[in-house]
Image: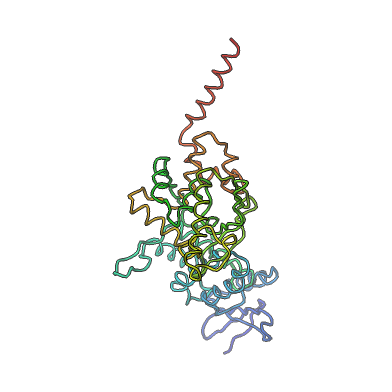
Amino acid sequence: MAREKTNIKNVYYDDEKKLYYARLYYGVVDGKKKTEWETFVKKSEAKTRVNNFEADKIREELAIPSKVTVKQWLEQWYNDVVLYNNEITTQEGYKTIIYKHLIPKLGNMQLQKLTEKHIKKYYKEKQTEPNGYKKNGEPKPPLSSNTVRKHHTLLMTALTAAKEEHLIKSNPLESKTLKAPEYVKPEISFYDLDNLLKLFDIVYDNNIEPAIYLAGTTALRREEISGLRWDCVDFKKHDMLIRRSDVRAFNKIHTKKPKNETSTRRISMPDELYEVLERHKKMQYENKKLMGDAYNSVDIEKNYVIVDDLGYQINPATLSSSFLKLIRKYDLPSVSLRGLRHTVASVLNDNGMTLYDISKLLGHASTDITSKVYVEMFSPDNRKATQTMANAISAAKKKTK
């Protein structure tokens, strides 16, 4: 006997198979009527499924049955959303996560069958299994929890969009039992003044000398250093206009907008930096005269401050790697260019500069950001604060005598 209607709307019974069927009508999808059937052993279960389905339909929370895979959705989301709403560096980062990590592990799975169990397993594997292998066959270390946390952010955003498109009924990452990988605050590395001075000595007349001084005296970000051009350096006023950032993404150098409104700023040049920039600008003119057509044809006044021997902009990634090679060669403590930015913040704080003024120099959007980044560096204990209070009390006592 075929399926027969029961006294419950959209619930049918097959007396041969002894099963109940819930008829789920989605309406017209792509010009065709869309109906799905689900089987149940108990009549009450079929009834509950139909009732829940109709309620979701009224609330417009239905996920239309689809065989779209995780790979297909991530690619569509990346091309339609990410490429039009994010900075170039974010685009590259997301593309790496999608194609190097997510698609190989989860790509073939149907999007509607992706569960929090699958995602938990993915997070665990990424933090315990090798992240590929080196040319010599040696395994690379697993991803850090901070890195996998970025994967979590991407998945949360992509699956929220899938839910809004009614491709999935719910986002598994919204489950209370699925937490983002733990964030571990990176350790801040920086130089003391002795090591900073040693660095200034060994970098003399090197192509990246201006970059070292810019980072180590004015705390510029690497992308701000890479994007600085001579037309923004005012030797008469002894200052610089920081208004552009150059980053490397997709194997090219791109100019992007300042990080925030306060990132566009004028910075006074200390005498040491003034001398370095003036000397290197003269060197560029001399090199251009010496090399002729082999040198970059761009007018030096409009060219970049940090250039190679032929006057071409040094890739930001090359700038970082050249710096690391230099400090290793001279056996200086390991630190990044960003570490020199931290060095400036530390020295200024130790010498009584206010948090507000340090924040302005760094180009942070607010002092809240500065305090969060440097809370440990600026406040190792409360001795400085209590001593300042003690000095104020002592001074006040002297006035009353």
**Callout count:** 0
Report the residue that reaches farthest toward the right.
Answer: 58
Say above or below: 51 vs 338: below
Residue 26 horizontal/vertical position (percent): 66, 79
- The quadrant in which the N terminus is found is bottom right
Report the residue that reaches farthest toward the top.
Answer: 401
Residue 117 horizontal/vertical position (percent): 46, 65
Q: Residue at x 44, y 72 (%)?
A: 105
Quarter holding residue 270: top right
Q: Along the line of sight, which residue is nearer the eye, 184 or 194?
A: 194
Colouring scheme applied when the structure was drawn: rainbow
Q: Along the line of sight, which residue is nearer the eye, 285 or 387?
A: 285
Residue 254 horizontal/vertical position (percent): 56, 66
Q: Residue at x 52, y 69 (%)?
A: 252
Q: Residue at x 59, y 40 (%)?
A: 357
Q: Judge left or right: residue 158 versus residue 10.
A: left
Q: Judge left or right: residue 112 versus residue 319.
A: right
Residue 29 horizontal/vertical position (percent): 66, 82
Say above or below: 254 vs 379: below
Say above or below: 105 vs 35: above
- The quadrant in which the C terminus is found is top right
Q: Residue at x 35, y 64 (%)?
A: 140
Q: Along the line of sight, which residue is nearer the eye, 188 or 398?
A: 398
Report the residue that reaches farthest toward the front.
Answer: 290
